[in-house]
Amino acid sequence: MQRCKRIIDGLLTFSRPESLAKSPTDLNAVVQQTIFLVKHHSRFKRLRLQTILDSELQPVPANAEQLIQVIMALLINAADAMQETGAITIRTRRGVTDAEAAIAEVIDEGSGIARTELPKIFEPFFTTKPPGRGTGLGLSVCYSIIANHGGRIEVDSAPGAGSTFRILLPNAQAPARPANPPGTTT
């Protein structure tokens, strides 16, 4: 049992993102860069990508490369959850507090996530994908990146009703607040 724990801890250390420098980052620009990177991928040729971007969204202290990684992982998961057609919407908006200054949402019309699985989706190596289609590390890494930014990631989902993954990022003045434990939503 201890050997398995050491192996898993080693894999997690490898897979968790290191803390990189943060600077004022335009979340809308991050979304647009991510869409540019994925729009030619075969998974997205059959889907509609829609954006609803808040033009008055203020920059937040962040590492743009890491946020692109998070949004790309969420988009790929959304595409995997979709049937042959449908829409994925990426929306940004202002939050109501300094701790939630900027919000980005990835909304899909996919199969949704069973209520019993929701508490586990941010756990390392948990996946609902068929064998060979995922490692179960994507959402765990996303969770770590957003927590490292002082933010949090939430999900609303129900079978047959799609999913909404919500990233909430603080502004520079927000006091650091602990992230929700993996698998919890608010």
Image (cartoon, rainbow, N blue to C red):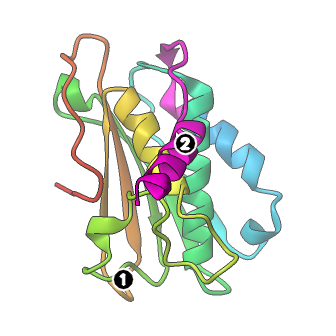
Using the image, determine if residue 82 lies above or below residue 94: below
The quadrant where residue 114 appears: bottom left
Residue 168 among those drawn in magenta: no
Single out the mark in the foreground, 1 or 2. 2
Q: How many labels were placed on the picture?
A: 2
Tell me the SS state at disc 2. helix
Q: Residue at x 54, y 22 (%)?
A: 63
Q: Is residue 178 visible?
A: yes
Q: Which is nearer the eye, 4 or 101?
A: 4
The quadrant where residue 70 appears: top right
Quick one: quadrant of the C terminus?
Answer: bottom left
Query: Mark 2 is on which residue type?
Result: Gly
What segment carries the magenta color? 1-29
> Among all residues in the image, which is located at the extreme front?
2
Q: Residue at x 25, y 80 (%)?
A: 115
**Which mark identifies residue 161?**
1
Query: Mark 1 is on which residue type?
Result: Ala
Q: Are marks 1 and 2 in contact (CB under 8 Å)?
A: no
Q: Residue at x 30, y 70 (%)?
A: 118
